[in-house]
Amino acid sequence: MDFFEHQDRARRKSGQLVLFFLIGVGVTVLLVNLLGYALYWGFIRYLGVQTDGSLGAWLTSDYSWQLSLAALLVIAVGSLTAYLQLRQGGQVVARWAGAQPVDYDTGDAGRRRFINVVEEMSIASGTPVPSLYVMPNEASINAFVASYQPDQAILVVSQGALDHLDRDELQGVIGHEYSHILNGDMRLNIRLMAVLAGLIQIGQLGQWLVGWRTHSYRSSRREDFAIPLLGLGLLAIGYVGVLTGRIIKAAVSRQREYLADASSVQFTRNPDGIAGALYKIREHATGALLMHRHAEDMSHFCFGEAVSLSQRLATHPPLDDRIKRVNPTFLARAKHRSRQSESADDAIARSQPDAFESVMGGAAVMGLAGQVTPGHLDYARQLYKHIPEQVRAAVHQSAGARAFCYTQVMLASPGHEQPILDRLKREDADSLDSLKRLWPFAKKLDAQLRLPILDMAIPVLKRYSEPDRLVFLDRIERLILADNQTRLPEWILAAQLRHHLQPGREKAPGRSRAFKHAGPAVVTLLSALVYQNRQPEQAEAVYERVIAPFDFPDKTLKSPDQAGFRAVTDALEDLQDIAFFWRKSVLQACVDIIQADGAVHQDEYELIRTVSDCLGCPMPPLVEREWTRDGVA
């Protein structure tokens, strides 16, 4: 199953979730009616009213319909309220978990290791570095990811995970979470959280009625006991809603956890890593249990079982089963000796190839979308080691992250460095010191390091306020357009920054747009790509071949002026609303254009990586053949 099939599967599971929700709503409304009938029957018996008190008469009465509508309204309000809150993205879930953003410039050894492991995994998978958070008050071992979009993910770990896991174990946990990012699980988890909020709303209403009547009770009339009785009944129904939610979460989550464990082993080529993390949860005093008040709501997000439940209702499989699946011999060995962790640096030095020795191109490019192999992680480790420490430190700071982006504009505009510096003195003087320190390193950086370093800078830039992000994006675009030329590296930089920093990107996406309306955007994108490294007559021949399968009314090749910087950036923004099935077709056409001459050059790979990133389809490094001087042989 490839990346696109995983996304479609996640969408189908969203449909199953709706079915489960409707069943839960039906059960809840029925229970509310039974409660209403019990109170109604008791009331008419108490008053001695002569009327048909049968259940059938109640269910067909206006009272029953009104009560059903009221229950549906309460459920709908609960789900809608949660949806509107969660619509802001993963940072809302992090805030509910009591998590705090990680300072990327931290001197804490555990947090630095966390940052390094995540950045390596992002390079290996081709996904942007998530925004990182730590739950400082959670001593247990746990982690989760949350977002609507892979490129807007947040990754949260507990303080206990940083304190108790070694590097290999932490990497196993991070690999597990990246599987959820790549398999489309995050959006499903957030929707599940919003849906279940409605089911428990009835119980919260009952709790409020009991509390309100207890504190405001002044009457001695016997019939006034109906209100607290109603509250207690609704509270009991609320517990049934919680039970229903747990059943739904267990049904949706368990197999995905097994898949994520297996994917972690595939990514890291080290079953002892994730097995060791699971074993430490097994032996830890509090396991993976979370103490904050939203632990129940978000238990299905987590790496380990966040709340204490009967195994039949647990969102995760038993720990021993998970350990045996990833490493059948681990538990037996753990009983006889404690594991000895190797130094991560020594392990890398012994087992990894020299940096940049192996990268592939050719026909395998499309199959890489959303896929991570041990080769990718090996390559990412070597790539990460070749990023100068001074550059890594700089892009983890606010001014340094901006300065790195400015160096990329300067490198792409030889001869225009001084005008760029003059403008920055007026508009962003705070970044000049960082720029001066970075410039000697930036001039010597291997081209393969540009995108990984930019990925490391983006989480820092995301922390700016929306107005500051817009100012920065506008400044970058004006610097690029100042010499009336837009070179490919400049377009890649601007497209990446705009995609990740544009306000509103972290929010829930709308419904998919019909592909037939995406014709102008597809034509603009393919027209721009086909002119790269080709003469106009060659470009037209390649374009006619790749555009043929698409059924658009107007498929005319646009001129270079019509497929310029802003037009292509707008086209990519339009294509973010189409279904993943069609994104695969568009990305395949882009790859066909790049591969038309039989070789994938470094700048062309960066172009494909940027297009795939903007389409929400992460593309990892190419790691099978040797790089030639000009590209991939």
Image: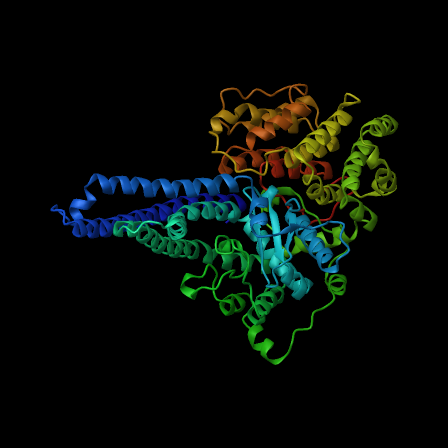
Q: Is residue 596 visible?
A: no
Quick one: quadrant of the C terminus?
A: top right
Q: Is residue 495 above or below residue 278?
A: above
Q: Is residue 410 above or below residue 369?
A: above
Left or right of 246, for residue 36 = left
Residue lying at 83% horizontally and 36% vertically, measured from the top left: 430
Depth check, front residue: 270 or 313: 313
Residue 323: percent from left, percent from top? 54, 68
Residue lying at 75% horizontally and 23% vertically, measured from the top left: 481
For this orientation, the residue located farthest to the bottom is: 336
Depth check, front residue: 181 or 70: 70
Q: Is residue 509 visible?
A: yes
Q: Quadrant of residue 533?
A: top right
Depth check, front residue: 168 or 464: 464
Residue lying at 76% horizontally and 44% vertically, measured from the top left: 449
Specify how the rendered protein is coloured: rainbow
Residue 436: percent from left, percent from top? 88, 38
Q: Quadrant of residue 526?
A: top right
Residue 3: percent from left, percent from top? 54, 46
Depth check, front residue: 102 or 166: 102
Count the numbered circles shown: 0
Residue 223: percent from left, percent from top? 26, 50
Q: Is residue 459 above or below residue 341?
A: above
